[in-house]
Amino acid sequence: MSERDDEADAVEARVGEALRERGHTVAVAESLTGGLVCSRLTDVPGSSDYLERGAVTYSNDAKLDALAVSRESLDAHGAVSAAVAREMAQGVRDTASTTWGVSTTGIAGPTGGTAEKPVGLVYVGVAYAAPWGSGESHTRADRYVFDGDRGEVKTRSATQALSDLLAAVEAVDGQG
């Protein structure tokens, strides 16, 4: 196992610890990572305590049907966009009734990139469901561009999604 693999293992273990300590749950919606984020979460023993489900929604139709991503967002921004990453995270969180939703959408390559959306472009969405009536629920999406071949882009995207989720979970301490 490489040093990078050890670091990645630590990220998913830390995500699990953070979720378990708070009594929170998570659901995952993936496009370019094709189930890798969910797979990494299930590598941690006891992940059934906090992982509710994962959805691989590779096509626009799958995003629309399984996650209620709006046709308007898909038409206006494309599947690889902050708007769609946010809607994917919200959709999986809400349909699974979990505390957290995390999503990945992007262009793994080697083809499919454009000047505006290059190969390696990834959006990670994270959605938090705060207690009802608190007004603290929120969703964000962050943009990344990763170098490397298809496998490297997918691996780095999954690690980034787990890191973003961990940071978000740790940031809501005391809010629910």
Image (cartoon, helix red, strand yellow):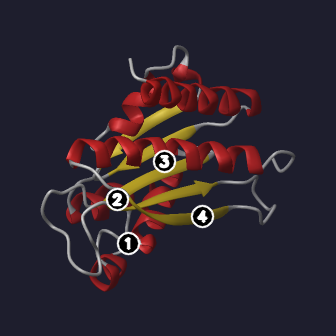
> Which numbered tag is attached to residue 105?
2
Mark 4 or 3: the one toward you: 3
Q: Which residue is disc 1 drawn over?
A: 81
- Helix, strand or loop at mark 3: helix
Q: Amino acid at mark 2?
A: Thr
Query: In screen coordinates, is 28 left or right of 165?
Result: left
Neighbourhood count class around disc 1 (C-alpha, 10 Å): few under 14, some 14–19, many 20 upward: many
In the image, farthest residue toward the left? 111
Q: Which residue is disc 4 drawn over?
A: 139
Pointers 3 and 2 in contact (C-beta within 8 Å): no
Task: Please tell me which of labels 1 and 4 falls first in the chain.
Answer: 1
Mark 1 or 4: the one toward you: 1
Task: Please tell me which of labels 4 and 3 falls first in the chain.
Answer: 4
Q: Tell me what residue is drawn at x 27 percent, y 82 percent.
A: 75
Task: Please tell me which of labels 1 and 2 falls first in the chain.
Answer: 1
Q: CA distance from mark 4 to mark 3?
A: 16 Å
Q: CA distance from mark 1 to mark 2?
A: 7 Å
Q: Which residue is disc 3 drawn over?
A: 160
Residue 159: image x %, image y %? 46, 41
Q: Which quarter of the image is occupied by the N terminus?
A: top left
Q: CA distance from mark 1 to mark 4?
A: 14 Å
Q: Amino acid at mark 3?
A: Gln
Residue 136: image x %, image y %? 76, 62
Q: Amino acid at mark 4?
A: Thr
Residue 46: image x %, image y %? 55, 16
Between 3 and 35, the one lying in front of the other is 3
